[in-house]
Amino acid sequence: MTKSILYINGDGVGPELMASARSVIDELVDVEWVEGHAGYATFKQQGTPLPQATIDSARACDSVLFCAVTTPPNIPNYKSAIITLRQELDLYANLRPFDSLPNVSVPAWASGGLQQPPSASPLHFAIVRENTEGLYSSIEESDGQRATALRVITRHASERIVKFAFDYAKARKFSRVTLVHKANVLRKTDGLFLEAGREIAKSYARAGISCDDAIVDSVAMRLVKSPQDFQVIATTNLFGDILSDEASALIGGLGVAPSANIGEKHSLFEPVHGSAPDIAGRGIANPTGMLRSAAMMLERIGCKKEAVRLEKAIARAYEQRIVTKDVGGSASTAQMVEAIRANL
Ligand code: NAI
Ligand code: MG
């Protein structure tokens, strides 16, 4: 049966990258596209960054493909559409796989060019970030002199995120999950996360998946020094947010990293990057993060073969060096997408 996909262009580079992704998906499978609106442009037109109609469509469709939205800094009480959408759909797991691409090494982002890789072997690991609580509980107060934010950790959310990480490890033939925390200082909150995680880990030992844990600050260092140490990282919301942006630099920068937001009922796929207003409309945005997210979505809706074809076609464009400037090439978005389509 034809699957229905809600697509949300968002702001900045969103519309151009989404158009590319849709054209590539249309080459591979028949899907029913449903348009949804969200973001700053939507706020300016409709008075809300996330209309109820978009939430309703997201619930009704088989999956959601999202680019990025701009969150204006100076509008009080403005809440990012993507954060609200994750909460509304209870997309509790944020999955970010990090896989090296041919001819891109690190930090291509900083240098804008190709460089020697820091490690001889290609990277292949994933970060699974809890997406609904932690320091992003939205419970914050300030009296102008003292401000507090409540870091909420529950056993329920800790168990389900660690279980998600182990199931992912099992499906992808990883052999270890690392619980990343700061339980030496945050004894109650991360103590609970760790205790719940270790309990879940026991039932996967038989399947040959081991569990270890590491303190977040040392993980930040080891990601730069020896990223091959890691297979699947499971962690709380803020730590996962920071570590995953750091990790994207190891594979070529924000332009190449994809992500999935997964819940019991719903799923949403989006590149890790934001709306990149500095390059919007110039036709130079890297479509890789968007297209890799599309490949993850295809797999989720049961089109595994097509997902693999897309991933291979993307990798081939890197072999051919038909890539955008941020990863050392000189192609426009359109030229790179055309090469990927031809490689399908
Ligand atoms: P950003 O990810 O949009 O951009 C950071 C840097 O990466 C910029 O120099 C940009 O040009 C570059 N970049 C991003 N995507 C790229 C691509 N596909 N190809 C080549 N270069 C790329 O983050 P920034 O600048 O902090 O935020 C801009 C806006 O995006 C803000 O309003 C922010 O709130 C929003 N944002 C939205 C997210 C979402 O919708 N999930 C996530 C992160 C930021
Ligand atoms: Mg982030």
Image (cartoon, grey):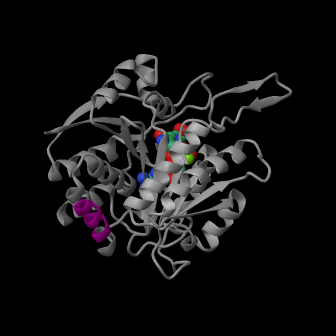
Q: Nearer the viewer, residue 133 or 224?
A: 133
Q: Which of 226 and 178 is in front in this view?
A: 178
Reply yes or no: does residue 311 show up in magenta.
yes
Q: Residue furthest top?
A: 47
**Magenta span dominant secondary structure:** helix
Coordinates of residue 156 in the picture (x, y in percent): 56, 37
Q: What residue is drawn where x is 50% and y is 55%?
A: 203
Q: Is residue 197 visible?
A: yes
**Position above or below: 272 against 329:** above
Coordinates of residue 94 in the picture (x, y in percent): 48, 46
20 lies left or right of 152 = left
Coordinates of residue 231 in the picture (x, y in percent): 51, 66
- Locate the N terminus by quadrant: top left
288 lies left or right of 161 = left
Q: Give the range drawn in magenta.
A: 308-316
Number of numbered discs on residues: 0
Q: Residue furthest bottom?
A: 120
Q: Nearer the viewer, residue 271 or 76?
A: 271
Q: What residue is drawn where x is 33% and y is 59%?
A: 332
Coordinates of residue 208 in the picture (x, y in percent): 47, 67
Q: What residue is drawn where x is 45% and y is 27%?
A: 88
Q: Can residue 276 be seen in this view?
A: no
**Position above or below: 119 against 260:** below
**Position above or below: 259 against 139:** below
19 lies left or right of 31 = right
Reply yes or no: does residue 103 show up in magenta.
no
- Locate the C terminus by quadrant: bottom left
Q: What residue is drawn where x is 41% and y is 42%?
A: 262
